[in-house]
Image: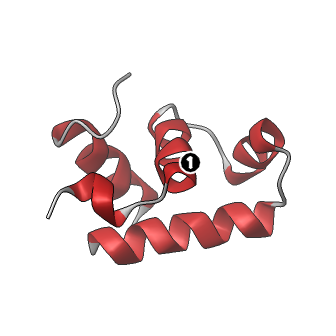
Amino acid sequence: MIIYDLLTAREIDVLRLIVQGKSNRQIAGEFYISERTVESHVASILSKLLLKSRTQAAVYALRFGLVSI
């Protein structure tokens, strides 16, 4: 299974901003959504990728080419 198949387009967008070091508040402002919605996206990303932190998600995304800097 390809990792892109696991994540939605919005989750990949959120992951891209996590890699850039953006906070939930900054991500929410970028997409005009609530911080709670961002938290839900982050939780979903971590769950789908079997990770425990935003830092792990950023490293994973870079290591496996999901996003670039």
* SS class, disc 1: helix
* Residue name at image x 24 percent, y 50 percent: 60
Above or below, 9 relative to 6: above
- Quadrant that contains the C terminus: top left
x, y percent for residue 51: 30, 70
68 lies above or below 27: above
Observer-nearest residue: 35 or 9? 9
Q: Quadrant of residue 39?
A: bottom right
Establish if 43 lies above or below 14. below
Are there few (<14), some (14-19), or many (20+) residues within 10 Å of tag 1? Answer: many
Residue occupying image coordinates x 83% and y 41%: 29
Quadrant (top left/top right/bottom left/bottom right) for the N terminus: bottom left
Question: Residue at image x 84%, y 60%?
Answer: 34
Q: How many marks?
A: 1
At x 18% / y 56%, what residue is drawn? 2
Give residue 3's quadrant in the image.
Answer: bottom left
| Front-most of residues 33 and 59 | 33
- In the picture, measured across the screen, residue 46 lies left or right of residue 38, that is left
Q: Position of residue 33 (x, y in %)?
A: 83, 54
Q: Is residue 65 left or right of residue 52?
A: left
Compared to residue 66, the image places residue 7 above or below, namely: below
Q: Is residue 24 left or right of residue 67?
A: right
Q: Look at label 1 and name its amino acid.
A: Val
What residue is disc 1 on?
14
